[in-house]
Image (cartoon, coloured by chain):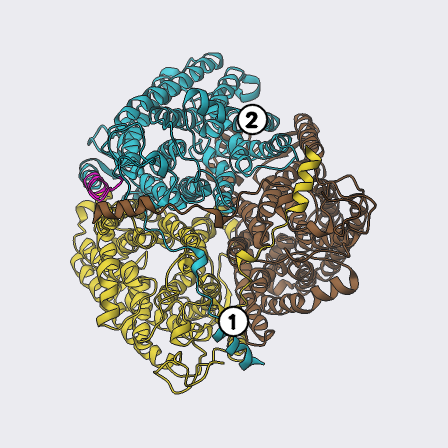
Chain colours: A brown, B cyan, C yellow
Amino acid sequence: MWTLNSPLTPQCCDQPKNTNVRISLPAVCFVWQLAMIILFGFFIRYNAESDVHWKQENKNISRSDIENDFYFRYPSFQDVHVMIFVGFGFLMTFLKRYSFGAVGFNLLIAAFGLQWALLMQGWFHSLDPMDGKIKIGVESMINADFCVASCLIAYGAVLGKVSPVQLMVMTLFGVTLYAVEEYIILNLIHARDAGGSMVIHTFGAYYGLSISWMLYRPNLDKRLNGSVYHSDVFAMIGTLFLWMFWPSFNSAISYHGDGQHRAAINTYLSLAATVLTTVAISSLSQKAGKLDMVHIQNSTLAGGVAVGTAAEFMLMPYGSLIVGFCCGIISTLGYIYLTPFMEKYLKIQDTCGIHNLHAMPGVIGGIVGAITAAAASEGVYGKEGLKTVFDFTGKWENMLPTQQGGHQAAGLCVALCFGIGGGILVGCVLRLPIWGDAPDDHCFDDELYWEVPEDEESIPPILEYDNHIRNQAG
Amino acid sequence: MWTLNSPLTPQCCDQPKNTNVRISLPAVCFVWQLAMIILFGFFIRYNAESDVHWKQENKNISRSDIENDFYFRYPSFQDVHVMIFVGFGFLMTFLKRYSFGAVGFNLLIAAFGLQWALLMQGWFHSLDPMDGKIKIGVESMINADFCVASCLIAYGAVLGKVSPVQLMVMTLFGVTLYAVEEYIILNLIHARDAGGSMVIHTFGAYYGLSISWMLYRPNLDKRLNGSVYHSDVFAMIGTLFLWMFWPSFNSAISYHGDGQHRAAINTYLSLAATVLTTVAISSLSQKAGKLDMVHIQNSTLAGGVAVGTAAEFMLMPYGSLIVGFCCGIISTLGYIYLTPFMEKYLKIQDTCGIHNLHAMPGVIGGIVGAITAAAASEGVYGKEGLKTVFDFTGKWENMLPTQQGGHQAAGLCVALCFGIGGGILVGCVLRLPIWGDAPDDHCFDDELYWEVPEDEESIPPILEYDNHIRNQAG
Amino acid sequence: MWTLNSPLTPQCCDQPKNTNVRISLPAVCFVWQLAMIILFGFFIRYNAESDVHWKQENKNISRSDIENDFYFRYPSFQDVHVMIFVGFGFLMTFLKRYSFGAVGFNLLIAAFGLQWALLMQGWFHSLDPMDGKIKIGVESMINADFCVASCLIAYGAVLGKVSPVQLMVMTLFGVTLYAVEEYIILNLIHARDAGGSMVIHTFGAYYGLSISWMLYRPNLDKRLNGSVYHSDVFAMIGTLFLWMFWPSFNSAISYHGDGQHRAAINTYLSLAATVLTTVAISSLSQKAGKLDMVHIQNSTLAGGVAVGTAAEFMLMPYGSLIVGFCCGIISTLGYIYLTPFMEKYLKIQDTCGIHNLHAMPGVIGGIVGAITAAAASEGVYGKEGLKTVFDFTGKWENMLPTQQGGHQAAGLCVALCFGIGGGILVGCVLRLPIWGDAPDDHCFDDELYWEVPEDEESIPPILEYDNHIRNQAG
């Protein structure tokens, strides 16, 4: 029996932690899901392109069925969907005994988050003034997945240290903050951010890091904070699906035609360059020149983050390579030097190293976006091109690229503020002793929240029968 | 040596079971594949959109190349294809020593089944009256994959208890029954079933359960009927690819434009809601509030099954959430209470719990479809919309939505009858002692049909050289 | 300490091998990536469909946005991308202790190779004569992935026996040779090769086999040259993603409309037939009729290779089945008889058996292509159809199908010569003792180039706390 006097007792609180979530987890799931049903009933309807009247209207204007936005964006949506659930989920399976929590809680909070995101983003972006309803379509689903991505990034910082109930609370607030921040950055400030370097990655990473800072565990037991051979291979599934589908992520909501086309090319190139510099730095950093799986699993993705904002701009193929080149270096160096430093001196425990994979590359992405926008010229883009790419329409008709660069920079600042500020506030909420989180010496362990099966070694050898078969055949 | 007097001898038969399939398996594979080649030679040709004359005809009517059905459906086809081979295959790898059989036999029977399905479905649906040939295209491939899905669902009930030869026989009959049942439901009864809640899931599940009932093993050894840590993570690969691509499954053969668009949205939402209620019930059902991987792997998918029939209808976003909400609860409760009950009292051994994942949600899906169809009104759909969605054309021109509701219900009954009746018949055939199935005490073991490699623990530690390298570097 | 006198010393060289790549690997990565940036800066620009001016031009000719080549090819591109990184990467994880090297080095050389391929193929195929720039778009990305595939095939032959630096050198030369060979076969000889049976598979396989022949290791230690249970399941991830997406591979660069449509159908069918004959031969070859995972992982894919060249021709559905039928047999027999023979008598050590999966099926694919082309008639294709399928335009306007058959055969010979000749030359370079490759007794071991985590068995059991929880709940 584990008591107050046991040396296992965490010193930061007065009573043993109770990780039983049998009341709180079902309660949160049921209540929130019921709330979603009611709110969806009041607010959410199909948009014109997914409504049954579309086909008839299409005939009237003799437009082809293939021009439904579904065919422009659905393949990209499915790729993004894979990134959210398999990509983020499996990337976090690298811990030796937290694979269930990684992939299972990832599914849970993503499934909740996307519903709440449809509502929050809908209220800000696609409320139909005629009937007060939110109209959803394939682009809404992509945006909901994007919004959820920011919460999953935040999960990376606290992986193994929080309860599923805390994760649900973190996601509720995260999605809410995201929707506000996104509205400010994209609509009020009129910054462009196709791949979400600022809106998704910068915000999500600093949100998670601030929460982790608020939940600092001085006596964290690190025995289970590491990988085994096969868990590293599982994590590579996540890495590769993120890496491969990132061109779809950055191009998913770009404008039709050359916008999506160019965003995919830029991301494809940037990621390729990142791999080489990541390998180089990883090898350089070890005495014997050996590679570290943590770097390969994470830093190879930094180029995709950093090219997010500028993906649809005329960044040029070599520009994408340069961005990827730098990010591979910076991200890998971050894993080597910055993560230990942050834990030791800043008291920020970052399980997955999201500061290196999302925070720094996200900020770089925002800066690259600002510079590329400020440097845009009519010579390269053409008059119409500038309008299309930077959406210089309506009240922004007379905006100049240099001004746009300033707005981009302002957007980056907003993302940073929302991430840090929001994270600190939510971190305070999550410090309440009611959420069922683990004691310091039982972090990174699936045993707390999962029925874990017996160990592999106990498989009974059934050899007799096999010998029988061999005899039969022989 | 394993003899008649050994306590291992199954009591239900007089002689030791011979699991050597060295004659029967190759014979079945060769003969059936040769039959396929001959039948394809006589019957199967490219349809107009995959024939070489298409491009010229297209030019003549100045239609764009992009309006080839390939571009409407191929991305969905590939997603469905992933569900069939990776989704179903890996979902069944959860057993500690049957991963080869899960993913390998899944590939075998799917590869055979899809060829036979092209023929069977072709004879019923796409026989060209001009030349007596079946014309295939991308939609035929999707339908063949759908047909195969029903057999793979049935495999889930008997996983680990049948030989590959039995699986091939089961698939041959399963595909045949499916094609007849599908023709009756979709063409004769004129029910709609875009995502196959009735045609695929209800039929497939009851087909498998009836076979499992006929093959009941009273002395089944359960030592290997469970998971280990890593096999559960492998199974999550299957779960996630099914979960993510289900919107493509339900929208793959909907009508172009808003039909596909709406089906994807409905499925996306239903699945999200299912996750939350599955987690809630799973946590509630355990003393300490811990989650059970079996529920997360399976019940989270129930919402996709149940929204199949109604996916292309105007179910409304909140309607989809409600369907998902209920199915998560019912499916998880099924795993907790119904599966043990069925084994104990009904003598139905259901390895993967397909009754909870496919049978019950499939029936719910059929009922939801009937209600939604009966409740369809011109106010919501418009006159043209009703025609398009419910295909009120030709001899069905004057049909009313309420009538359609009745037809939907009739379709569900046909699927149930074919599943149960067909399963009992095929189960009788599979009881013949010629198929090389395992004895009761060697089920769930890859050793019987696979060359299994040595165990992990026997990897020799090669440390000397590694020390050498460290010295070199130091 | 491992010294000259140790029995572990390889006898083929005078000094202990130094596998420290801390200088060479980072140097190669940095220098080559910098070179890429500079060359991309000079040469590579967006093509018309990914340039910002496209939208405006499109409006001028009132063409729909959906007719951007992006929407024709991007879904196929993403499928090909998955094959390159997850398919090839995971297919090679079957070794018990080389999964990091399989999936990690696969990522490294693919990421480098695709950049160099864009340049090399660009110079030969898409140099704009107006401004001397290479114009890239989605088709260029597919072609770059195709080019990389040939180098990854070659990697299969030397898996576990070369250093990452050698792999980079092998890829540099491989891509270069590929681009020249492809130019000769497709442009000068005017052979057709949509799925690359000749250009990709035949060339890549013989390139790898020749290198492996040059690097023959007489004292190769085979203790680690085998699988464990879970590594075989990981490899099935690779197999399945290759198998499922092969229709996209063979149709990715076919002509729009029926070309892509037909190529996908042919590949889908061929692969299905291959599975059945592979299973049949694998079962027949074992005393007890058991299946061998090596065959299922590899030979089931042979049908996709062999149908590559003829995929877009009017091969007919039964024709595809016949090709798949034969390849499953030949490939599996190759694993049983040919691979041991080649190692023993020809001194070619082929880790993954690429001779059976790529070389023989590739050659068969070339022959099938030649025969199908020679047999093409105006009766089947129509006059316009022949022009479209075989590109009888420009200086090839008066070509006859029989001539085309001859050209196809010539193309196959060129691929063979480039593969064998190039492999021998590059093999000579790779024999230099400067590349950091492993000694004969340390092949197939991740320890040499990776920081490998502790073993699974050392996970500390943390049971006390768990008991505490159970008590709490009870």
Q: Position of residue A151 (x, y in %)?
A: 67, 47
Vertical placement of C459 versus B181: above or below?
Answer: below
Residue A329: percent from left, percent from top = 62, 70
Name the main secondary structure of what is drawn in magenta: helix
**Quarter residue C207 falls in:** bottom left
Magenta span includes A8: no
- Nearer the observer, disc 2 or disc 1? 2
Please state which of residues C66 and C406 is positioned toward the viewer in this rendering: C406
Which range of residues does the magenta coloring cover? B19-32
Does residue A382 show up? yes
Going by the picture, which residue comes out furthest to the right? A14
Viewer can see residue B361? no
- Residue type at mark 2: give it: Leu
Q: Position of residue A450 (x, y in %)?
A: 61, 41
Callout 1 amino acid? Phe
Number of marks in the rendered image: 2
The residue at the point 60 percent across, 51 percent down is C461
**Tag 2 near tag 1, CB within 8 Å:** no
Q: Which residue is denoted by mark 2 in the rendering?
A: B333
Q: CA distance from mark 2 to mark 1?
A: 59 Å
Q: Which residue appears at 38% of the width and 21% of the height?
A: B415
* Mark 1 residue element: helix
Residue with the mark numbered 1:
C40
